[in-house]
Amino acid sequence: MTTSSAASQGSQQNSAPVTVSRVVLSAADIERALTRIAYEILEANKGLSDLLLLGIPRRGFPLAQRLAVKLAATDPTVDPATIVGQLDVTMFRDDLAHQPTRAPQRTQLPVSGIDGKTIVLVDDVLYSGRTIRAALDALVDLGRPRAVRLAVLVDRGHRELPIRADHVGKNLPTSSSEKVRVHLVEIDGGIAANDEVVIEAGA
């Protein structure tokens, strides 16, 4: 084998896989999607009475906070902080044995609790449905809501459980080999300067 052939072969073996990403939702797109979801929630609930938003960490929580601000803007008597909380589902997941160690986040419920309330679970991406199943199990341990609905920024398909979102910002057909990344300034400020949703695929 010639030196040049060996170098070429070594280069091919050492080269890292190339990832190609494309932006599918810009910051403006995300803002419009959240505004539409907020109006849908208001209409479905016929106002803000007994309504609570629970975001699933990590990115579901800031999305829930943004939705709470939009909802509270329709009623000046409502403080958005009183209708939003965070629901950690780590210990209710069915894939803990197959995933890297997850650091549990703090569950924070509004002082009113969840009994008799309409709960809107908020997450960034709906995929297999297993995270939402874990969220439903977590809710059972915390109380008895009147109804539970689901709002997601992106539904990428590939469901493994019979779970469907009530409010969807964007239906995004993907292949199972692709990755959907949601960047929010509250969480990813050091990575992305603006909100965005990107699809990553190997070249």
Image (tube, helix red, strand yellow):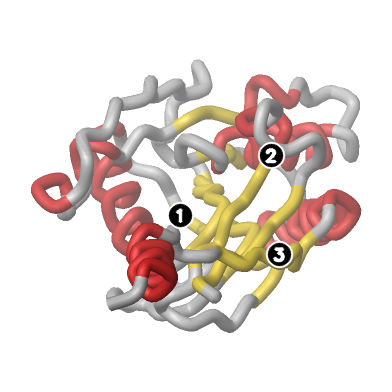
Ranked by sequence position, the earlier of labels 1 and 2 is 1
Q: Which amino acid does label 3 sit on?
A: Gly
Q: Which residue is drawn at 45% across and 21% down?
A: 108
Cα separation, mark 1 vs mark 2, equals 28 Å
Q: Residue at x 83, y 40 (%)?
A: 70
* Secondary element at image label 1: strand
Farthest front residue in view = 2
Q: Which amino acid does label 2 sit on?
A: Leu
Residue at image mark 2: 184
Residue at image mark 3: 169
Mark 1 crowdedness (10 Å alpha carbons): few <14, some 14-19, many ≥20: few
Would you say the residues marked 3 and 2 are in contact, meaning their CB atoms lie under 8 Å apart? no
Identify which residue, 199 or 135, lies in the foreground: 199
Q: Which amino acid does label 1 sit on?
A: Ala
Cα separation, mark 3 vs mark 2, equals 15 Å
Point out residue 33 in the picture as x, y percentages from the top left corner: 79, 59
Residue at image mark 1: 147
Point out residue 100 in the picture as x, y percentages from the top left corner: 22, 41
Ranked by sequence position, the earlier of labels 3 and 1 is 1
Picture quadrant where residue 191 is located: top right
User: Which callout, 3 or 2, points to the residue nearer the camera?
Assistant: 2
Point out residue 201 in the picture as x, y percentages from the top left corner: 54, 71
Q: Is residue 36 left or right of residue 50?
A: right
Mark 3 crowdedness (10 Å alpha carbons): few <14, some 14-19, many ≥20: many
Residue 36 visible in this rendered orientation of the protein: yes
Farthest left residue in view = 97
Vertical position of residue 91 compared to residue 177: above or below:
above
Would you say the residues marked 1 and 2 are in contact, meaning their CB atoms lie under 8 Å apart? no
